Image: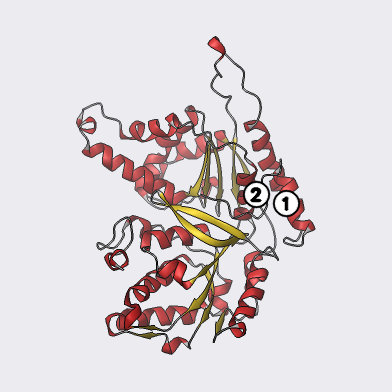
C-alpha cells in the first residue's frame, strides 16, 4: 500500500512527527510522542547491520521485536503507522488492513487445498501460504486494526504467525483493544490464548492513551455536503479538505486492490480526495471500494452529477461505493450538482438509490460524523455473485 503520509522518509518517525507539528498539521500530543519512540526503536533495530557469513553472504537477520499499538478510535494510530511505514527505507515491507491480510491467507489456503499438492496426507496449508511470503524476503508486516472476531481466524493465527516470526518477519500493528481483549468471549477461546502469549512475546505492547479524539474534531460543526457548481462548491470543499488534513495539500498516490493499483488523485493524513469520475466511471467494484474504505478514514468526492439513464453504470458504482463507505463508517464530504432528492433519475437503479439517499442523509449527521470506524470485514469475504476482479458485471461492461 502507498503511504498516505505527506512526509517522506526522514530517518526517524519522531522527526517526521515533529515536522508535521511545526507545519501546524498536528497538535503536539505527549502520548503520540511516546509512541514515536517505540516506533523508532523498531526502525533502528530493523536497520542494524547484518553480518556476513560463509561465502560472504548475509546471514539471516537477527530477530526484531515488533510493536502492538492499541488505543481508542481517533487517537492517531493510523497516522503514526503512516509515518513509520514511510520512514522504513527498504522495500521488503507490506502494509494492509488486518482483515485484508487474512482474506489473502484464506484465499491461499483454499487454492492449496484444491491443488494436487494439497491432497496429500501430510499437506500443510499454513506452510504453503507462509512459504512464498518468506521466499519473497518480507522483513516487515504492518497490519492496521488488528481485531479477531471469528473462530476461523482465531484458530489459525498461532500457527500462521508462529511460522512468520520464525522466518524473521517483524510485526507492527494497530488495534482498538489490548491483546488480552482479542477474541473476547469467543468460542473455544482457550485455544486462542497461546497466540496472545506469542504476540506479547514477539511484540512490545504499547498504549496510546490520548484524551482527544482528533477524528471527531475534524468534522465538528462542519457542513460536509455542498450543492451547485463552480466556486460555490469548490471553495467549501477545498476548505474542508485542508481541515481534514491539518493544512496538508496532499499528493497523488495509489492503493493496491487485488494485485492492481487504484490511482488516488490526492491523499494526506488518512484522507483521500477523488473526482466522481475517478471512482464511478472506471471499472471498479465492491472489492475495490472496500479497499478504499479500509485505507482512508475520510474521503472527499468532487462533482457528483445528476445520474440519469445515460449514467446507469456510474450510478450502480456510486451505490456500491456509498454502501462500502457507510458500512465502514468512513467520513464523506462531497459536492453535488443537484440536491440529493434529484440525484438519481434512472428507473434501473431507482430502488437501490433510495437506500443510498437514506445513507447519504445519515452520513451528514453529527451522530455519524462523531462515531469511529466500524469493522466491515465481511464485505471483503462475501462479494456479490456478479463480481470478479474488476468489480461488478455492470462495472466491467461499462
Q: Which mark is residue 167?
A: none
Which image quadrant for residue 27? bottom right
Q: Position of residue 26 (x, y in %)?
A: 73, 60
For the residues bearing labels 2 and 1, Cβ distance under 8 angstroms? yes
Q: Can residue 186 be spotted in the picture? A: yes
Residue at coordinates 65% horizontally, 24% vertically from top-left?
49
Label 2: few (<14), some (14–19) or many (≥20) C-alpha neighbours in 10 Å: many
Label 1: few (<14), some (14–19) or many (≥20) C-alpha neighbours in 10 Å: many
Residue extending farthest top: 54
- In the rendered view, tell whether residue 210 sits above or below residue 135: below
Disc 2 to disc 1, C-alpha distance: 7 Å
Q: Which mark is residue 17?
A: 1
Question: Tag 1's secondary structure?
Answer: helix
Q: Position of residue 356 (x, y in %)?
A: 40, 78
Where the C terminus falls, by quadrant?
Answer: bottom left
Residue at coordinates 64% horizontally, 57% vertically from top-left?
76
**Which of the colour schemes (rainbow, by chain, secondary structure, one colour) is used?**
secondary structure
Q: Can residue 325 be spotted in the picture? A: no
Residue at coordinates 67% horizontally, 48% vertically from top-left?
8
Q: Position of residue 291 (x, y in %)?
A: 44, 57
Q: Position of residue 334 (x, y in %)?
A: 53, 76
* Residue tagged 2: 83
Amino acid at each position: 500500500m502507498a503511504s498516505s503520509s505527506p512526509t517522506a522518509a526522514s530517518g526517524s518517525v519522531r522527526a517526521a512527527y515533529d515536522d508535521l507539528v511545526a507545519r501546524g498539521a498536528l497538535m503536539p500530543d505527549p502520548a503520540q510522542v511516546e509512541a514515536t519512540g517505540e516506533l523508532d526503536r523498531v526502525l533502528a533495530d530493523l536497520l542494524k547491520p547484518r553480518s556476513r557469513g560463509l561465502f560472504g553472504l548475509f546471514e539471516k537477520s537477527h530477530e526484531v521485536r515488533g510493536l502492538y499499538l492499541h488505543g481508542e478510535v481517533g487517537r492517531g494510530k493510523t497516522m503514526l503507522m503512516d509515518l513509520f511505514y514511510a520512514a522504513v527505507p527498504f522495500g521488503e515491507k507490506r502494509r494492509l488492513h488486518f482483515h485484508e491480510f487474512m482474506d489473502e491467507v484464506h484465499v491461499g489456503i483454499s487454492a492449496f487445498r484444491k491443488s494436487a499438492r494439497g491432497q496429500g496426507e501430510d499437506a500443510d496449508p499454513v506452510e504453503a501460504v507462509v512459504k512464498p511470503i518468506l521466499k519473497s524476503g518480507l522483513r516487515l508486516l504492518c497490519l492496521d486494526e488488528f481485531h479477531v472476531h471469528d473462530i476461523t481466524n482465531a484458530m489459525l493465527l498461532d500457527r500462521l504467525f508462529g511460522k512468520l516470526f520464525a522466518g524473521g518477519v517483524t510485526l507492527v500493528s494497530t488495534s482498538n483493544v489490548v491483546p488480552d481483549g482479542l477474541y473476547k468471549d469467543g468460542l473455544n477461546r482457550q485455544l486462542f490464548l497461546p497466540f496472545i502469549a506469542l504476540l506479547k512475546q514477539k511484540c512490545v505492547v504499547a498504549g496510546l492513551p490520548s484524551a482527544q479524539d482528533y477524528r471527531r474534531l475534524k468534522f465538528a460543526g462542519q457542513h460536509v455536503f455542498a450543492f451547485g457548481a463552480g466556486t460555490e462548491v469548490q471553495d467549501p470543499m477545498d476548505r474542508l479538505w485542508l481541515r481534514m488534513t491539518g493544512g496538508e495539500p496532499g499528493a497523488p498516490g495509489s492503493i493496491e486492490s487485488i494485485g492492481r493499483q487504484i490511482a488516488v488523485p490526492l491523499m494526506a493524513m488518512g484522507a483521500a480526495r477523488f473526482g466522481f469520475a475517478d471512482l464511478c466511471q472506471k471499472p471498479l467494484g465492491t472489492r475495490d471500494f472496500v479497499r478504499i474504505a479500509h485505507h482512508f478514514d475520510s474521503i472527499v468526492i468532487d462533482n457528483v452529477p445528476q445520474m440519469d439513464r445515460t449514467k446507469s453504470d456510474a450510478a450502480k458504482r456510486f451505490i456500491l461505493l456509498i454502501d462500502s463507505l457507510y458500512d465502514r463508517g468512513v467520513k464523506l464530504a462531497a459536492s453535488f450538482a443537484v440536491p440529493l432528492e434529484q440525484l438519481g433519475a434512472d428507473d434501473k437503479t431507482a430502488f437501490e438509490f433510495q437506500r443510498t439517499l437514506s445513507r447519504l442523509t445519515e452520513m451528514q449527521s453529527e451522530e455519524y460524523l462523531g462515531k469511529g470506524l466500524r469493522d466491515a470485514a465481511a464485505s471483503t469475504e462475501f462479494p456479490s455473485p456478479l463480481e470478479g476482479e474488476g468489480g461488478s458485471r455492470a462495472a466491467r461492461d461499462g
